[in-house]
Image (cartoon, grey):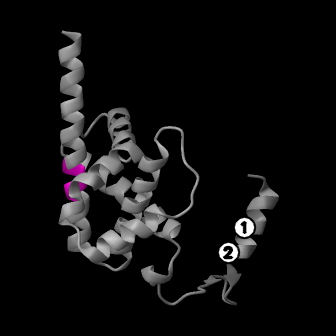
Amino acid sequence: MTFEHFRRLVDMMFEPDGSGGAMQRYQEVNPRTLHPLVLAYIGDAYFHLFVRGRLLSYEQSKVQVLNQFSAQMVSAVWQDRAYREIETMLTEEEIGVYKRGRNCKSRVTKSATVAQYHSSTGFEALLGTLYLQEKNDRLYEVAEAAFQVISRAMMEEAGKKQAVRT
């Protein structure tokens, strides 16, 4: 990003409030009116932090290992798998949020199929919605369930690879 591009973005985003700060445009955030990709943006950030915090239960000194595990666990492939296994614990409203995010048009990365990427976007939109609604207990419950599904599946996959090597 060039400095000029950055400057245009700052000018577009922030408006001076007259006392040296930036004026807020919105007094509240209503998840129902936000674009699903904005919800997924927030949900992605939350799940990254959640996973990093949970991984400290297993490793506390090797940053590279923590980074590799967290990057894999928050990937579209694993989030899709987690969603499919936790869907039965979700309410109709939560499934509706997921579908709204899943059906949103977005760019797909090369590391996942289109279906997996869209599914993970729906999962992240759900987390983003719960976060913005400040439903912290439910947010933790859903994120923890996903973490358990992913960690269990990673152990199974590692076990299969180990069995093939021997």
Q: Where residue 165 appears, x then y in whole percent?
A: 23, 11
Q: Quadrant of residue 129?
A: bottom left
Disc 1, disc 2: CB below 8 Å? yes
Count the numbered circles shown. Answer: 2
Q: Nearer the viewer, residue 87 or 66?
A: 87
Find residue 13 and name its label.
2
Is 119 located above or below residue 103 in the figure?
A: above
Magenta stretch, residue numbers: 144-148
Q: Is residue 53 visible?
A: no
The kind of residue on which mark 2 rests is Met
Q: Quadrant of residue 66?
A: top left
Q: Quadrant of residue 128?
A: bottom left
The residue positioned 22% from the left and 42% from the top of the image is: 151
Farthest residue in the right direction?
4
How crowded is the residue under tag 2: few (<14 C-alpha within 10 Å), some, or many (20+)? few
The kind of residue on which mark 1 rests is Leu
Q: Is residue 76 visible?
A: yes
Q: Where residue 117 appears, x then y in whole percent?
A: 46, 50
The residue positioned 49% from the left and 82% from the top of the image is: 33
The residue positioned 38% from the left and 43% from the top of the image is: 77
Q: Nearer the viewer, residue 125 or 21?
A: 125
Label 1, secondary structure: give it.
helix
Farthest residue in the top direction?
166
Q: Disc 1 and disc 2: Cα gap in Å?
A: 6 Å
Residue under label 1: 9
Q: Main secondary structure of the magenta part?
A: helix
Is 9 located above or below residue 157 in the figure?
A: below
